[in-house]
Amino acid sequence: MKTEWWKKASVYQIYPRSFMDSNNDGYGDIQGIISKLDYLKDLGVDILWISPMYASPNCDNGYDISDYYNLQKIFGTLEDFDALVEKAHKLGLKIMIDLVFNHTSDKHKWFIESKKSKNNKYSDYYIWSKKTNDWVSCFSGSAWTYNEERDESYLHLFSSGQPDLNWSNPSVRLEAENICRFWAEKGVDGFRMDVISYIGKRDDLVKAKGRSFDAYTNHQKQTHEYLYELNEKVFSPFNMVTVGETPNVDVETAIQYTKEDNKELNMVFQFELAECSNDGEPKWFGRKPELSDFKDIMIKWQKGLETEGWNSLYWENHDQPRSISKFGNDSDEYHDVSVKMLAILQYMMKGTIFIYQGQELGMTNTVFNSLDDFDDIESINAYQDLLNRGLNKEAAFNALTRVSRDNGRTPFQWNSGENAGFTSGIPWLKVNPNYIKYNVEDETKDSNSVLNFYKKLLKFRKNDEVILFGKFKNIDCPNPLFIYEREKDGVVYRIIVNFSNREIYRAKEEGEVLLSNYESYGNFLKPYEALVIKK
Ligand code: TEU
């Protein structure tokens, strides 16, 4: 297994709308990011993954692209982007952009042309059919929308504003290649590829029975071929780091995507952890996860990608509720220790780490006072869907509050001033009221803060061969404990985590405590205590 640079890297995801607003229009922007590069450098991350900034009508906040070669005005200009790449590179930070290739916006010129007739240059850029099936889109409602001009329907696995591209058309593949090359030539260092596992679809998909589309659209052999083609043409020649978003991927398929010899992607995002407590139901019906829900999953992926492939370690992103609220304990009493425990538990494992903006502050789920506080298309559509399923308004509202993607999208908390220092305009999404407690300015001053703990953790991890490349071994123990070891060249670290708010007796282990979320260590593990001990 080669030790490419990105295996040692920490990736920091920026959701540009919510990061920093430089012109006070209420939306974050590129100049805002530029103004905070020093903060990110000081934090100790290496790669900045920035969610889409391309031209877009924003039915899904930029994941519906209407022009892959231009940015939307709220974020700035291509010149701003060039300046960002240049300044980031000067600081030694790499830039990873988000490519949304499964679908475009319905306002993209390809789609505008495609829907006009069956015999123009773009007619076959999308998946059109006279016949349809019962598939339900990810954002509720049918996955097909009828178009009068063509007297046919088009497929959209997401909203009707996000028609799926037809990757079996070589012209579409060439467009994708050109887009990748354009951005690679601009100096970007990597691509995060949105729902990339869906690009290859079976020809006979209209014949599918049932409401779920995965068997015909996800992880098809064509997808592997298309990725290989992109890799040969762009990823490898430009030395790009790539991570693909691959819902419902299992270990074996993840290896297929990420195995070096296969020349497809470097890493994938798996969804098992994110969905571990949904019990196969839509996330709105999920439970709060327990350690037992995801212990086995974590072990399985650590062992599964031990010799081939490579793990991406993420719990948060712009689609997920905040990890402290989901997995941890965000009460005042336990917030800090519990955030730090989660960081130790996850980031002492093997893989490239992904931190979502605000995670390093311990940002939590937010407070929604009414339906108007939601912005996300998935949440808004789901609300109606939940009512149709028979939930009353309160239950539907509560389900949204718990897991809506908007929880992870509230503005970044820079200080305790107006709108958390994000903007002096009206923020596009309300600021989480707890910015008074959790923000960069105050946490920087407090040596015991979550932010300073993250800095310490990142620094510790950076050059630690045991954590970066050591073998993983699970140590059997009852819940709520999770104990594992990392070993390299005879050096062993034992990671001990108490995943509960109870004190637990456990004889003190010999060895040097390298990292911990408490000042002292004894025979009782304190609530949410987490330790890295060198044996
Ligand atoms: O997400 C894909 C995806 O699977 C999500 O829709 C996920 O299932 C859902 O958010 C969990 O509730 C990607 C992007 O990350 C997301 O922001 C986009 O909305 C989506 O693709 C469509 O481009």
Image: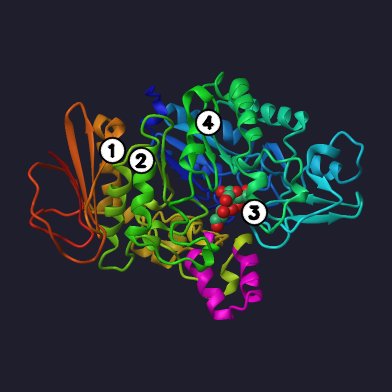
**Residue 405 vertical placement versus 117 (above, below):** below
Q: Dot 2, how many residues are within 10 Å of its Cα: few (below 14), some (14-19), or many (20+)?
A: many
**Side (left or right) of 388 relative to 122:** left
Mark 3 or 1, nearer chain start: 3
- Total marks shown come to 4
Cα–Cα gap, marks 2 and 4: 18 Å
Q: In the image, which is nearer the foreground, mark 3 or mark 2?
A: 2
The residue lying toward the viewer, choosing from 11 and 197, is: 197
User: How far apart, in angstroms, are the residues tagged by discs 3 and 1?
Assistant: 38 Å
Q: Which residue is mark 4?
A: 265
Q: Secondary structure at mark 4?
A: loop
Disc 2 residue type? Answer: Gln
Q: Which residue, given by chain and number where applicable, does mark 3 sit on?
A: 60
Quarter of image, res 374: bottom right
Provide the residue span drawn in magenta: 379-405
3D distance between C-alphas at marks 3 and 4 = 25 Å
Q: Are marks 1 and 2 in contact (CB under 8 Å)?
A: yes
Mark closer to the observer (3, 4): 4
Mark 2 or 4: in front is 2
Q: Nearer the viewer, mark 3 or mark 1?
A: 1
Considering the numbered disc 1 on the image, is that residue within a helix, a strand or a loop?
strand
Measure the C-alpha gap from mark 3 to mark 2: 33 Å
Cβ of mark 3 under 8 Å from ligand 1: the answer is: yes
Residue 342, given in percent of the width and then of the height, sits at 31, 53
Q: Is tag 1's residue or tag 2's residue first in the polypeptide sequence?
A: 2
- Mark 1 and mark 2: span between their CA atoms? 7 Å
Residue shown at 32% from the left, 43% from the top: 347
Q: Would you name the residue on which mark 1 appears?
A: 472
Residue 394 as seen in the image, left or right of residue 78: left
**The N terminus lies in which quarter of the figure?**
top left
